[in-house]
Image (tube, grey):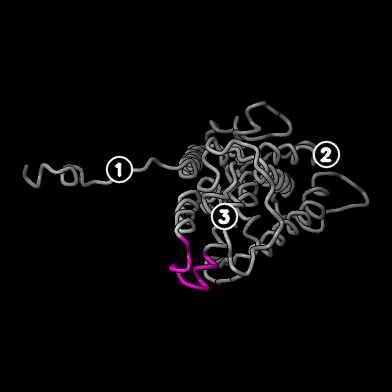
Amino acid sequence: MGIGDRAYMRDRSAPREPLSATAWVVGLLVGFFILNLIQESAHADFLGWMTLDESHLRPWQWLTHALLHEGFWHLLGNCLILWWTGATVEQEHGSATFLKVLFGGVLLGALTWFLTGLGGPHDSALVGISAGVYALMLVALLDKLDHQITLLLFFFLPVTLKVRWLLLITALFTLLGWGFSELPARHDWPSWKAAWRDGIAHSAHLGGLLFGWCAWRTLNRTNWAPSYAQVQEPMPTEAPSPAFESPTEENSPARPLTSAQARAELDTLLDKISAGGFGSLTAGEKRRLEELSARLR
């Protein structure tokens, strides 16, 4: 048998991985943005049926409004956060969970926006996937509160801060915008007027944050991903011992770990490696390290 007949020579190209659900959603948003540009250039209105309009509500609009955006910067901001946090949720919990969180955030955001305008003049419309993006952001980041991230403000000014501060600032801005800008701007109240008008649907963002928080709490108890659709035990409250002991095959729990539990156990093993080197791990701990790494990859 010649060298060209060997298995490793016959197939040298790595199999192509399918596009992730995150990539498909981003591509869909860009595609509809291009269609909207064509619509505006042609002075037509073939996408108007997708907008969530207070004066002409249709059942499909509760979802289709998320596919449209008000300008390039609106689309870019949503797509950047979606690509970052959506990919994290999809890798940790699966594509099905990613889609459930995204659509759930969009729906609750639209409902919160609609309820905010009840009693008003009913002349507002909603577009954008921001509510779903906010929901994904909470699911992706709530268990990483002490992680450091660097943001590029105005795309050139780097700012490094902890995740907890990013989420607190986002939630505070959303609440202030809802109470002092959007809510009074959509009503004719004599005693409560808008402090500023920014045209942002803060109520939809608020609904997305609420759904994301509920989804994160649910995922800590039951993982929606098909591979781990079992009720999980709560994480033990005991801190790791100074010896960095970790469960081996003999004493590992019978039920699958949640993603948060797996990350905590992996961090314990990594701390032990940092303190004493890779050789300080036992054979069982090395096998456990490989299992956890594969699980969270």
Q: Amino acid at mark 3?
A: Pro
Viewer-nearest residue: 173 or 248: 248
Front tag of 1 and 3: 3
Q: Going 55% across and 33% down the picture, which residue do you hit?
A: 47
Label 3 CA crowd tier, 10 Å (few <14, some 14–19, many 20+): few
Query: Which stretch appears magenta?
Result: 270-282
Task: Give the x, y percent position of residue 207.
Answer: 72, 44
Picture coordinates of residue 124, whole percent (x, y):
72, 40
Residue, disc 1: 15
The reply to whether residue 41 is in sight is no
Mark 3 sits on what residue? Answer: 247
- As drawn, 63 above or below 217: above
Residue 262 in the image: state x and y as whole percent: 57, 52
Q: Secondary structure at mark 2?
A: loop
Name the N-terminal-most of marks 1 and 3.
1
Task: State left or right for residue 43 relative to residue 114.
Answer: left
| Quadrant of image for the N terminus | top left
The image's mark for residue 32 is: none
Q: Going 52% across and 45% down the picture, which residue do you hit?
A: 90
Q: Dot 2, crowdedness within 10 Å: few (<14), some or many (≥20)?
A: some
Q: CA distance from mark 1 to mark 2?
A: 56 Å
Measure how far apart labels 1 and 3 are at the Cα level.
35 Å
Q: Which residue is mark 2?
A: 120
* Residue farthest to the front, as pictured: 250
